[in-house]
Image (spheres, rainbow, N blue to C red):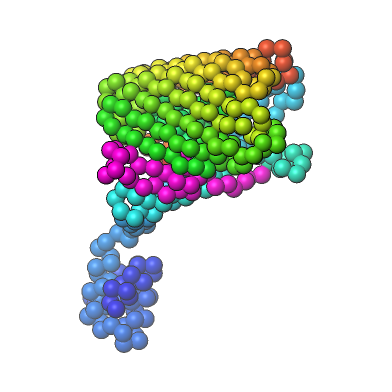
Amino acid sequence: MKKVLATAVVFGVMGVSYAGEVKNPIIKKLYEKGIITKEEAVELENDLSKKETPVVSKSKKLKFGGKAYIGYSYKDAKNGTDEGSFEVRRGYFVTKFYFNKKDFFRFTLDVTYQYHKEDPDEGKELNFKIKHLYLYKDVSSVIPATGFELGIAHTPWLDYEEHSGWWFRSISKTFYEAKDGANLLPSADAGIDFKTKTEYFSAEYGIFDGEGYDHIGRKDKGNKGNKPMVEGRLTWHILGGGKKKPKPLSQTYANISVHALNSFNHRGSDDNLTVYQIHGVYNQPLFLIAGQYLKSDWYSGSENSGEGFSVNFEIRPLPDRNVSLFGRYDNWNSDKYDRQLFIYGIAWHMNKYITWIANGKTADYDKYDSKDYTKYMISAEIHY
């Protein structure tokens, strides 16, 4: 009973006891009601005055976290309307409930900033989506070093690249996903995703719906019934470290990966979408360099039927590595568009929670000048 009362007192205004006088209003009221004695009231008040009240309590079962991308962008269109605006580009709110040390349930709320679906002339609004909703189950007793996600789960490629080769998701998606890059699939989908992690090799592979978490069951390219997608990634961690996500500001790592997928009757069409990709990255605290080659095939005339490559670098010249100079070049040649994307900028890692970024992006479309633009961006990337 007294422990419950003490917990309630934490939310009161802290008082200070002098010469046996009780000043905390909640403790004083408990004493006046005869629930606790004066000696107990004085002792409780003195104890509370010596301790800091924790703002956040820890739980072994329930964990919260997330990230947000906030900033300002100004777009200089080559043959269009110039415009600038403040943006909440993304907000992820993550909740995990652990059943034991390895198994958990994850829920991720995805906040996006996009035009009104009914009428784009009405401007933009914040939109809420479910990014992840899955059960993670460790099955290493059956399949060594393996577990799986079941539900709205990660897909095998993007989460890996965003945590090894391209660390600036807040200003641009990866070449694989970016609208001015290969413009393929997002990082989550309905399905089952297996993860195998060892020191020198890791693999991720699964079966998915194939249209992405924001278009589950989409059939806008034909009348074929929904068919699954099979996808997989295999990575050789040359210097080790395959069991955990790397820390680029303090660790050295070198990885080579291959990635492939086949989405049968993709988006209801008569054709399968196939993707083949090879990727390499080398990082040490002073710098990072990464590159990839990608080839995809869908129906004739699609922007997803093509091939291209991307290279990116990051230089951290200061001794504490908290400032990064970075750049990226994408080149995509498809049945519909041939385009290039240049990204360049500087980042300041203020602390483990906040990174500030100033950058530019230039898109250059062959034969489609109306799509050319240069964008200038100031961003805050927040992790919590």
In front here: 227 or 304? 227
Please say whether residue 134 is one of the residues in the magenta stretch: yes
Q: Is residue 23 visible?
A: no
Give the total number of marks visible in the rendering.
0
Query: Where does the magenta region start and end?
Result: 125-154
In front here: 233 or 14? 233
How far from the left and from the top, in percent, is residue 88? 58, 40
Please say whether residue 38 is one of the residues in the magenta stretch: no
Residue drawn 61% across and 20% down? 305
In front here: 258 or 161? 258
Q: Is residue 369 above or below residue 178?
A: above
How far from the left and from the top, in percent, is residue 231? 48, 31
**Overall secondary structure of the magenta stretch?**
strand
- Relative horizontal placement of residue 49, taking residue 111 as reference (left or right): left
Give residue 72's quadrant in the image: top right
How far from the left and from the top, in percent, is residue 113? 62, 40
Residue drawn 77% across and 39% down? 121
Q: Is residue 278 visible?
A: yes
